[in-house]
Amino acid sequence: MKSVFKKNKILVVIVVGILLVLSLNFFQKTVKGFFYATSAPVQKSLEQTGSNATDFFSGVFRSKELKKENEELELNIQILLAENASLKEIQEENQVLRGALEIGLQKDFRLALAEITSQDIGQGSILINQGSKDGLNKGMPVITQQKVLLGRITEIYEDFSRVALISSKESSFDAEVLDRGASGVVKGKSSQLLTLDLVVQDKEIKEGDVVVSASLGGIYPKGLLVGLVQEVKRSDTDPFYQIAVVPFFDLQRTNSVLIILDF
Amino acid sequence: MFRRIFIYALFFYFLALLQTSVLADLSLRGVINLISVFVILINLFEKPRDYAGLYAGFIGGFFWDIFSANFIGQNALILLALALFIKIVLRKYVWAPAF
């Protein structure tokens, strides 16, 4: 009997493995929740170490590039300062007009703050430290403090939630190109790239145009920042543009996120 | 044997934590997965008659599933199959004096 067991050891390992796996899927939320809760403190400090190390190495390896970028940014600051001054004037004017017309400001979103616990870049998802206990639900949009769209909640645990990023391959939502009146569907392509499909070629779209979310599909509220147009391709056979969009979010520099509870 | 499995469990647990925190930040961008790399290495350098590499594959995949959006078991079974494949190839087709 003992020798038979020894001979079929591999088979036993496989059978036990499959049975264990199948049974664990019935308590997936509990099992994953338990591991997330116990690992959160270690993971948080590791995450911090990771972003510090990234900052250090990117500084070392990209010094030449950074110098050039710095010069460009300084130039941009000058332009933006001038723009800012004129916008302040417009804002004051706007406030006066609103007061006069008695228009209330658009109802702000109800938000909840959470921190990123871990990242799964390959799958295009992140884990945040707020869950069903904190009133979160599946499908809630997640943004950064700069109103940049990150994604939406796809899995919910008691104390944690998994957020599928807009760059994940399953992600697809309606968006529009700011000031161009063109709308289409943004799809995730890779961790660094999105595509904007179904934009009819009758509108002019240029590199550097800003893509924002549209309320059409009801997935995200209108006007959240999505990304910048990187490349626009035209084709004579295709009535639509092929547009590559670089997302605005930068996970390496984002530690906390905001969840839109209702919109 | 149990001591080795326990050590593998601890090792892969911390590797999964590293994979989803430090390494996710360090521009690896999901290209290199240390868990599968170590499962392959363990199975390649272990004696083909030993079975601990199979446990390593299963445990490594299990922790990978826990800390990712996959359902529990997807990578556990893939890495178990991979470990088994390496074992069979080494046993049947590779001859080395060390084995």
Image (cartoon, coloured by chain):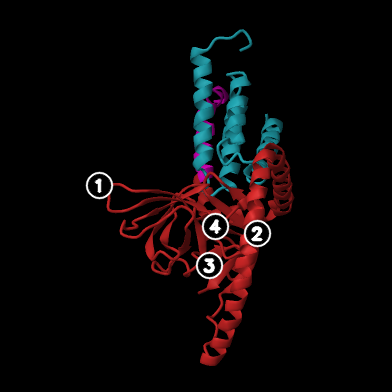
Chain colours: A red, B cyan
Residue at left offset 54%, top offset 80%: A107
Q: Nearer the viewer, residue B10 or B16?
A: B16
Residue type of the residue flagged with mark 4: Val
Residue at left offset 56%, top offset 22%: A3
Quadrant including the N terminus of chain B: top right
Tell me the CA gap for discs 3 and 2. Answer: 40 Å
**SS for callout 4:** strand
Give the image location of residue A224, x and y in percent. Answer: 51, 66
**Contact flag, marks 3 and 2 (Cβ < 8 Å):** no
Q: Which residue is mark 2?
A: A77
Going from N to C along the chain, the mark reached first, 3 or 4, is 3
Give the image location of residue A204, x and y in percent. Answer: 37, 58
**Contact flag, marks 4 and 1 (Cβ < 8 Å):** no
Give the image location of residue A78, x and y in percent. Answer: 65, 60
Residue span colored magenta:
A1-21
**SS for callout 3:** loop
